[in-house]
Image (cartoon, grey):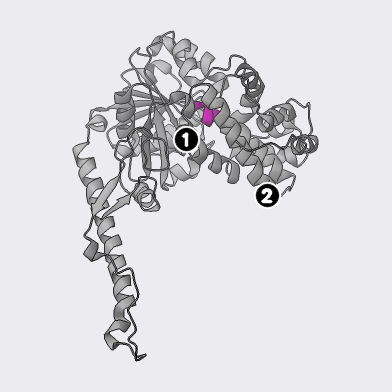
Amino acid sequence: MALKIEDNSILTMTMALFEAPPSFNCNYPLFASSRNTSTVVISCSASSLPPPSSPKIPEGGTTNPNSLNTAPDRSRDRRKVVRLAWEKLVRWSRSWRSKNRTDVLQQTNKVVVLGGGSFGTAMAAHVANRKADLEVHMLLRDPLVCQSINDDHCNCKYFPEYKLPDNVIATTDPKTALIGADYCLHAVPVQFSSSFLEGISEFVDPGLPFISLSKGLELNTLRMMSQIIPQALKNPRQPFVALSGPSFALELMNKLPTAMVVASKDKKLANATQQLLASSHLRISTSSDVTGVEIAGALKNVLAIAAGIVEGMHLGNNSMAALVAQGCSEIRWLAMKMGAKPATITGLSGTGDIMLTCFVNLSRNKTVGVRLGSGEQLDDILNSMNQVAEGVSTAGAVIALAQKYKVKMPVLTAVARIIDNELTPKKAVLELMRLPQVEEV
């Protein structure tokens, strides 16, 4: 008979975190393919499996002493089958990787990171650690942070206790940062990206691939980063990749196992980006669904604010679970209307990112929600933060998107109304609970 181990099995998920990543067109956590699902088939003879029935007891009521060992034998047989399955799976993984190695990293000499926030810094450190002679230039606005990176090898604002690799170089000069770059990691907040990029466009090579780390929608135009970057650079052919998935900057700095997705219309570029970023502690899957990855990454920040409000109001675990489930549905409804694949929304860059942002207190968007739910005013919250909570701005785009695509989004709309001070958190909860009770779809 054949024992099939599917990509999204627990066995494969475990391996996926600790094995260097192969290249798949996928967005399922952590090892599946939305187009061509890879299945490992391990053949074993029927004789190697345990017998289906228990030993027969003779009429005299006594049993053969040897038959008492049948249960342990069955257990040993099962363990042997599982061990063989695991060994074949690991061998297959290693063989696959050896056949699909590329020299992208070897051919890359310079990477530029736009922005010096926590995630941009973490990714700069990660890429710099991939190759000692790789130049990683960070383009910053703050000269003090720039000086601390160059002199003390740390980001004094976001990671003062973490030493950055020596090959991370900071500058405030766009020409110095961009000249000769092979890849660009864009980590500027969405609402400031357009004006920032317009200011440096003359130094950007038209063939420079942009890997966007920014999540959100431009408030007035509803544009995603895949639209903002080429339009701001006045180059519709600017190579673009969206990087998303459940990833806190602090855990990347600590080199804890993490899995993310790169999405691009250009399959070769997605694969090249995967090879550039993937390491023993960062697993990168590939996808062609740019819209799904970007919309999920943007709206999960709004949902995280809602989750924080529930926690700040002490409404309990039942409420939290119901709210996040409803929010996931709303994100899926909108994304599908915009042309995204359902599998993307239920995968790593969708549900995976939502779970991390909504349930873990390291999320700055959830922190905003917790403080709103506790009765603080939004202006006071934002003035006390040293990082941008993208969900606050993105929430303003939710109502416009819901109207444009004719999608009912009660939870995310409620967040937008709370942020606009049109609704209190308490009244929002009452209104949501009074919504018609309909059949779940």
In this image, 323 relative to 203: left or right? right
The part of the chain drawn in magenta is: 294-299
Q: Residue drawn at (39%, 15%), measured in percent from left and top? A: 175
Residue 109 in sight = yes
The location of residue 233, given as percent across then percent down, is: 44, 11
Badge 1: how crowded within 10 Å, few (<14), some, or many (20+)?
A: many
Mark 2 surroundings: few (<14), some (14-19) or many (≥20) residues within 10 A: few
- For the residues labelled 2 and 1, the Cα–Cα distance comes to 25 Å
Q: With 333 as the anchor, is 277 left or right in this view?
A: left
Q: Main secondary structure of the magenta part?
A: helix
Residue indicated by mark 1: 349
Q: Which type of secondary structure does the marked residue at label 2 adopt? A: helix
Residues 174 and 244: in front is 244
Depth check, front residue: 284 or 398: 398
Q: Quadrant of the C terminus?
A: top right
Q: Is residue 250 left or right of residue 221?
A: left
Assess whether residue 252 is covered by the magenta stretch. no
Q: Nearer the viewer, mark 2 or mark 1?
A: 2
For the point 37% across and 90% down, the residue is: 61
Image point (25%, 52%), residue name: 42
Query: Which quarter of the picture shows residue 205?
Result: top left
Disc 1 is placed on an element classified as helix
Earlier sequence position, callout 2 versus callout 1: 2
Where residue 163 is drawn, which disc sits there?
Answer: none
Answer with the quarter of the image where residue 54 lies.
Answer: bottom left
The N terminus lies in quadrant: bottom left
Residue under numbered circle 2: 318
Tell me which amino acid carries mark 1.
Answer: Ser
Residue 425 coordinates in the image, percent (x, y): 76, 36
Q: Quadrant of residue 357?
A: top right
**Residue type, numbered disc 2:** Asn
| Tally of marks | 2
